[in-house]
Image (cartoon, rainbow, N blue to C red):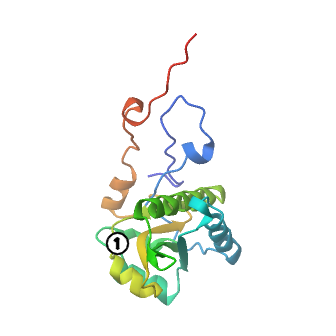
Amino acid sequence: MTSSPLEKPAHTNADLHPLVAGRWSPRIFDSSYELTDSQAMSLGEAFRWSPSSSNQQPWHVVILRSGTSLFDEISESGLGGFNQAWAPKSSAYAVLLADQLFEGKPRNQAATFFDVGLAASQLVTQTEAMGLRAHYMGGINPEAVAKTVGTKDQDVICVIAIGKQGTLENQSAELVEREQLERTRKEPGEVYSIDSKAN
């Protein structure tokens, strides 16, 4: 059993930045690690400075750190399925919210969610740059999460678990099995196309 965190670099011949190639979503976190005020602010600022359509910034992120009552509420009622078994050992949850209205009218949902997705990616990249890990969770109870963070006019998009990656030692067999699954992607031709330049 390894005593150091698993690494799962992208299988590619392309010249990728290490923050892109090395990013993956572990489920094992060091439960003793505490996210500092400075780190939490860096995550919030990375989210805030993401690009958005017409600079409307249709988003909000609530960062809840472990050891707080709101973090515990999300852990108990906001997470679904297997997420309840591992996510509470992370250092923080980033709850991503998308505005439902713009100037009193329903927002374009596709554009809004695209903007929030960009901001989420930027937050996760900042997480990686700080030597931490992040795991997007769609398996949540949006109504319970919305109640916990006190929002009524925003959609709960996802919850991201953030923290210091842990090791496989002293973990459940199911968690270890999931953690060791190979990191895979579709074949390049299924995902992207590049035009051919004429000679």
User: Is disc 1 surrounded by few (<14), some (14 to 19) or many (20+) residues within 10 Å?
Assistant: many
Q: Is residue 165 visible?
A: no
At horizontal 35% and vertical 83% (from top left) the residue drawn is: 144
Q: Nearer the viewer, residue 182 or 74?
A: 74
At horizontal 34% and vertical 72% (from top left) the residue drawn is: 140
Q: Amino acid at mark 1?
A: Ile
Quadrant in the picture for the C terminus: top right
Q: Percent x, y for residue 106?
A: 42, 73
At horizontal 47% and vertical 85% (from top left) the residue drawn is: 149
Q: What is the secondary structure assignment of the residue under circle 1? A: loop
Q: Which residue is mark 1?
A: 140
Q: Is residue 98 visible?
A: yes
User: To which quarter of the image does residue 110 belong?
Assistant: bottom left
**Residue 19 vertical position relative to residue 75 in the rendered view, above or below:** above
At horizontal 50% and vertical 63% (from top left) the residue drawn is: 116
**Residue 108 vertical position relative to residue 8 in the rendered view, above or below:** below
**Residue 54 vertical position relative to residue 100 in the rendered view, above or below:** above
